Image: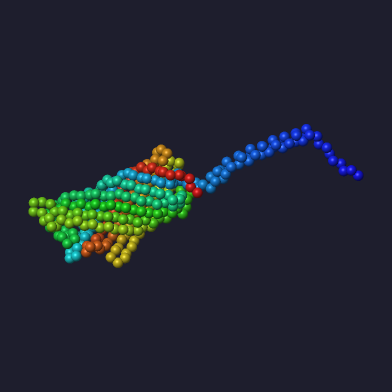
Amino acid sequence: MRKFIPKVSVPLMLLLGSVLHAQTEEITKTTEVIPVAKDTVGDSNLRDVPWYVERYRISAGFYEMINKTNVTIQGSSNQGTDLDFERDLGIDKTNETFYADFEWRSSSRSRFNLNYFNSRRKNSRTLDRDITIGDETYAINTNLNTTIETDFFRFSYGYAILSKPKYEVGLLVGTHTITTKIGIKVEGENADFEKNKTYDAVAPLVDFGVWGGYAFTDRFALRGEINYFQLKVDIFDGRTFGYNVSAVYRVWKKLDLSLGYSGLDLNVNFDTDNVSYDVDWGHSGVMLYASYSLGNKKWR
């Protein structure tokens, strides 16, 4: 018995081949579009963070400081006088200074900050009582010129435990380095120039705290932090308490303006070069500064 084998004409085979070729080209075109979707899948892994979270932020502005300065400097043989520099020596209580800050975000949760400002104050006054600074005693009615120069450096690292599209909250650790130079100069016709003295001191301190921010709109946000630390080791006893809060407004693209209030209360007791220092120094005031951001804002 013969098997039945269907016969297909040549024209029909050509027609089928043409249809298969057209379908193959259509599938190829569709396949070529697929890689575009890979970027979309990658973008879904990006983290949504507050608008002010930028890779690099450079800030500069002005700080109107209100100071309080109580200092006792004791020499090798004398008990120093507890001096209120603003009240007893007539040093200005307020001064304007330059403020600068650099912030680097190594990730959307981690930030490093370095900031700096200084204070330069001086005054001449005729003493209304005897005072002792170091090993020198200055008698009543002495015309005394006093200068106090302070440089403030702070480096800190913060990590956001909570990081959401509108807000972030985290912990931080920082180091304060405060350098102070106090100059005492006797003025007048009968001045005893041997009593002219300069005292230099450096006070390093560590602090721990919390920080955070909240974006109310896509242009306005509040940022702030509070920190504290106390340490007593051998000849060093120190305590620091600091805070700041700022309202941030995005003016144009990467440019922000901030208005804030900042403060620091510092009390340190330490010995160096046969001189004992007891410093109770604090400042607070209004800050106004501009910030410019750099870098890629995409976070994963």
Indicate the position of residue 285 as horizontal and vertical percent values.
31, 48
- Please indicate whether residue 36 sits to the left or right of residue 94 in the image: right
Image quadrant occupied by the N terminus: top right
- The residue at 32%/50% (across/down) is 116
Q: Nearer the viewer, residue 277 or 265?
A: 277
- The residue at 42%/51% (across/down) is 111
Indicate the position of residue 249 as horizontal and vertical percent values.
40, 41
- The residue at 17%/65% (across/down) is 77
Q: Residue furthest left?
A: 190
Q: Is residue 241 visible?
A: no
Q: Nearer the viewer, residue 133 or 286?
A: 133
Q: Residue furthest top?
A: 11
Q: Residue furthest bottom?
A: 234
Q: Nearer the viewer, residue 71 or 159?
A: 159
Indicate the position of residue 138 as horizontal and vertical percent values.
14, 58
Question: Could you say which quadrant of the image residue 51 lies in?
Answer: top left
Vertical arrangement, residue 76 with respect to residue 22, above or below: below
Q: How is the structure coloured here? A: rainbow
Q: Residue furthest right?
A: 1
Q: How many marks?
A: 0
Indicate the position of residue 40 as horizontal and vertical percent values.
56, 43
- The residue at 33%/47% (across/down) is 100
- Please indicate whether residue 15 sits to the left or right of residue 35 in the image: right
Q: Nearer the viewer, residue 158 or 23?
A: 23
Q: Is residue 136 visible?
A: yes
